Structures are given as C-alpha cells and as structure tokens.
Image (spheres, rainbow, N blue to C red):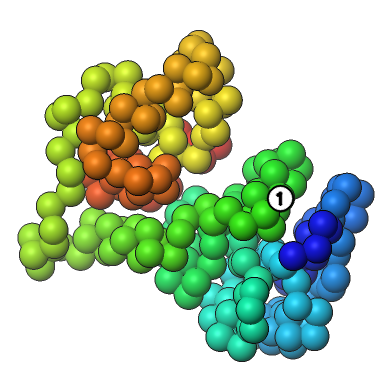
C-alpha cells in the first residue's frame, strides 16, 4: 500500500457524499480516487481505481451496499480493498449482511469527522474493525438472539461470572464501540487501567483479540444490537 490511503466514497445522497469527499480530501495522507452514487457505479469504479478503502453506504436504490460489497471483494485482486460500511443505524440487519459479505467493519454516519478519519486510517493501515472470522460469529450471535426455537442448539457463550464488576463494565463499553481513551474518560480511570481490565478479561475468557471480546459481549447478552453505550442514542 502507498503512503497515501486511496479511498472510494459511495453514497446515494449527494450532500452526504460531497461532505465525505470534502472531509477526506482535506485530510493529510488521504487521496479520494472516486465517488459513486449507487452500488453498480461503485463496483465499476472499484475495479478501475483499486482503492485501499471503500466507504460504503448500505441503503441505496438499485444495487445496495451489501451486494456491491460482495461484487467488489469478489472481483478484487490482492490486496483487496477494505470496505468500511457507513450506516445511520447501529448494528441493524443491513450491517450484519454487509459484514457477512466481507466488509471490514462499520461506522455510524453521525460519528463525527475525527472518528471517521481515524477509522479510515485504521482500516487503511490494515486493521479490521472486526476480522472476517469474528464477523461471522457476530452474525451468528445476532441470529441466535432473533431465532427463537432452535437457538438452544447453538454453542453456549462464555460465562462472565469470573469477571469483576469493573471488568464487565469495561467489556460493555468496548462492545458499545468506545475507544480506550473514551472508556477512561467515562469511568474516570487511566487508559492504562482500561487496558489492564481488558487484558484480564481476555485472559479469563480465553480470548485473543478485542474483536472477540465484542463478540462475547453480544453472545452473552451483555449488550444487544443497537443498544450499546457507544451508539450515541
């Protein structure tokens, strides 16, 4: 990947798309290689421009963002672009569909410019907001919560009983999408203390990554889709 992150912006609403393009063009280390107003145009532009990151709206007329994500990743060479889903809704069924299609993660449209630029930088640098193997489990966790009969056949989630109240609180905030700095500010503790709580949580639950901790929070019902503390609602 070049030192500049090449970004393709996809959104059917002109004003939103123009705002995103303007914000990204003003950011150091970012190059906007194209903008698309629907999924079909996005697929064509992705093949032409080979972006590092695709900012993908989901709800668009014609080909939606989920189908566009599948097609872009299906036809991409190596390295494939990373798709960062933009949505108005926190963890709704459309987001799960996009993650299942191979998107690297999602971001709420009202997250603010700083969080958007940070997400683009993180994804462009090779970090997945949720790794593909984890997103499949996240989708499955969501399905179990809404499946009703038959859900009993699923593998039981880990027991949170080994965690302290503070560790549970930190886990819940992580699952809500808050950063370590935001959690530290929320709980009036240092970032180092947040990391300590997270590391102990991961050790107790035999987890390997922060993303897996998020999955556990959903699997155990500690948080539910759309209700995380970081949703801003």
Give the x, y percent position of residue 105. Answer: 54, 58
Give the residue displayed 45% in from the left and 17% down from the top: 193
Mark 1 lies on residue: 121
- Can residue 146 be seen in the rendering of this structure? no
Q: Residue furthest top?
A: 188
Vertical position of residue 51 compared to residue 183: above or below: below
Give the residue displayed 32% in from the left and 19% down from the top: 166
The image quarter in which residue 12 lies: bottom right
Vertical position of residue 111 compared to residue 88: above or below: above
Give the x, y percent position of residue 30. Answer: 84, 56
The image quarter in which residue 91 lies: bottom left
Horizontally, residue 117 falls left or right of residue 23, namely left
Q: Quadrant of the N terminus?
A: bottom right
Horizontally, residue 27 falls left or right of residue 182, namely right
Q: Residues within 10 Å of mark 1 (few under 14, many from 20)?
A: some
Q: SS class of the residue under badge 1? A: helix
Vertical position of residue 148 compared to residue 71: above or below: above
- Can residue 162 be seen in the rendering of this structure? yes
Give the x, y percent position of residue 96. Answer: 43, 64
């Amino acid at each position: 990947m070049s030192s500049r992150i090449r970004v393709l912006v996809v959104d059917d609403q002109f004003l939103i798309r123009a705002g995103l393009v303007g914000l990204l063009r003003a950011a150091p280390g970012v190059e906007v290689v194209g903008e698309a107003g629907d999924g079909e145009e996005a697929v064509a532009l992705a093949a032409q421009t080979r972006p590092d990151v695709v900012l993908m709206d989901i709800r668009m007329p014609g080909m939606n963002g989920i189908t566009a994500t599948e097609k872009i990743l299906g036809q991409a060479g190596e390295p494939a672009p990373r798709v960062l889903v933009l949505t108005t809704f926190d963890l709704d069924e459309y987001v799960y569909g996009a993650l299942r299609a191979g998107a690297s993660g999602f971001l709420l449209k009202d997250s603010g410019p700083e969080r958007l630029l940070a997400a683009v930088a993180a994804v462009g640098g090779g970090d997945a907001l949720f790794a593909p193997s984890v997103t499949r489990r996240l989708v499955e966790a969501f399905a179990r919560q809404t499946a009703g009969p038959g859900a009993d056949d699923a593998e039981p989630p880990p027991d949170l009983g080994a965690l302290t109240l503070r560790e549970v609180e930190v886990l819940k905030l992580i699952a809500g999408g808050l950063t370590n700095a935001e959690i530290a500010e929320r709980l009036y503790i240092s970032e180092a203390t947040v990391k300590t709580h997270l590391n102990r949580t991961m050790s107790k639950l035999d987890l390997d990554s922060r993303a897996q901790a998020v999955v556990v929070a959903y699997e155990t019902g500690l948080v539910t889709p759309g209700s995380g503390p970081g949703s801003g609602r």
